Image (cartoon, helix red, strand yellow):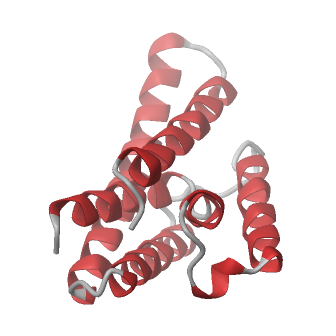
Amino acid sequence: MEPTLATRVALLGIVTGMRTFVPFALLAWLAPPVGWMATIWARIVITLASASELVLDKLPKTPSRLKPGGMAGRVTCGGLMGWALTAQAQGPVWLGVTLGVAGAVGGAFAGNKLRGFLGRTTGKPDLWFALSEDVLALAIGAWAILGLGAH
């Protein structure tokens, strides 16, 4: 697999760990249309799922992303995203899935731990760090697609 594709998959995997549906929304709108994501209806559904997640993440009763259900969704989406990108580029799908899953696990733990650390250290409300994590996820994802070039 070419380094740029591997880097893109790994970065989007990390973003998947931070915000499960953000990479799919970014791919749907910023990358050349691919397969099922090419329709406007798919883009709308993906965007609504992503926006809903951004809101639900801030609610106090939302379970931790590190619990089995949250982690399973992130790992599944990271693997799916890695598979889709490498299959489209005719690269080794097993490596794309592996990078997507590893990135999702790493992003989930890093985002969770950093957010908790910053909240404890500064005493500021979690909402500030949750919103900052949203912006970071969007920025990393957009850079992975646009800055590294979408193929």
Q: Is residue 31 left or right of residue 37?
A: left
Residue located at (65% from left, 87% from top): 36
**Residue at the (33%, 80%) spot, across then down:** 89
Q: Which image quarter is the N terminus in? A: bottom left
Residue located 59% across and 87% down the image? 35
Residue 144 appears left or right of 47:
left
* Image: 50 above or below 42: above
Q: How many numbered discs sit on the rendered protein?
A: 0
Left or right: 119 as drawn, with respect to 41: left
Q: Which residue is painted at 50% across and 51% down in the image?
A: 18
Q: Residue 90: horizontal and vertical position, in percent?
A: 29, 87
- When the figure is inspected, residue 35 is found, relative to residue 100, above or below; the finding is below
- As drawn, the residue found furthest toward the top would be 122
Seen in the image, is 57 located left or right of residue 98?
right
Residue 143 falls in which quadrant of the image? top left
Depth order, front residue of 11/145:
145
x%, y% of residue 13? 39, 62
Q: Looking at the figure, which quarter contains the C terminus?
A: bottom left
Find residue 81 and report its horizontal and vertical position in percent: 45, 75
Q: Is residue 72 above or below residue 24?
A: below
Q: Nearer the viewer, residue 68 or 40?
A: 40
